[in-house]
Image (cartoon, rainbow, N blue to C red):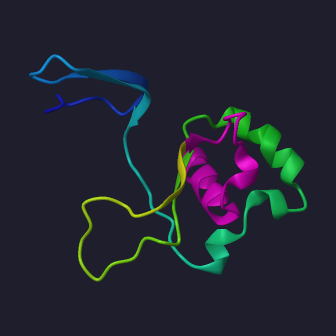
């Protein structure tokens, strides 16, 4: 059980099992999580936007905006304990290895607007 933690971060969390095994989670944020959901409108990525170079540079100012993308192969009429497919694990907007170009454009503008509010 995690203690109450102030919003923000990034935090490092160490979890130790009774067997002595340890897992360390790094770059963890606490706070509100907003879910963007949809169909083709969510699939339009920022790299397809005519100003994508500007937004890629702008993303460096928003490292706490993250994206996680569930793959198309995950669907169920019952609650799931785990996802069948993950298209993209959690990634920061400023992450150079994946970058803001792969972000859903709708989610990027929504997250940036909330961040600036």
* Residue at point 53%, 72% (across, down): 72
Q: Which residues are magenta?
A: 91-117
* Residue 72 in the image: above or below residue 9: below
* Residue at point 70%, 35% (across, down): 97
The spot of residue 78 in percent (x, y) is 24, 78
* Residue 89 in the image: above or below residue 40: above
Viewer-proximal residue among 40 and 9? 40
**Residue 103, magenta (yes or no):** yes
Q: How many marks?
A: 0
Viewer-proximal residue among 14 and 114? 14
68 lies left or right of 45: left
Q: Residue 14 falls in which quadrant of the image?
A: top left
67 lies left or right of 79: right
The spot of residue 40 in percent (x, y) is 65, 79
Q: Residue 79 falls in which quadrant of the image?
A: bottom left
The spot of residue 36 in percent (x, y) is 51, 65
The spot of residue 17 in percent (x, y) is 15, 24
* Residue at point 46%, 62% (across, down): 85
* Residue 9 in the image: above or below residue 93: above
């Amino acid at each position: 059980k995690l203690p109450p933690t102030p919003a923000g971060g990034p935090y490092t969390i160490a979890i130790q099992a009774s067997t002595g095994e340890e897992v360390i989670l790094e770059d963890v944020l606490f706070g509100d999580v907003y879910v963007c959901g949809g169909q083709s409108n969510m699939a339009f990525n920022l790299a397809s936007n005519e100003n994508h170079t500007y937004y890629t540079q702008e993303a460096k100012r928003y490292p706490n905006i993250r994206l996680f993308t569930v793959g198309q192969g995950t669907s169920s009429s019952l609650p799931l304990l785990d996802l069948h497919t993950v298209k993209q694990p959690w990634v920061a907007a400023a992450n150079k290895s994946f970058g803001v170009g792969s972000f859903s454009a709708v989610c990027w503008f929504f997250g940036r607007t909330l961040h600036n509010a």
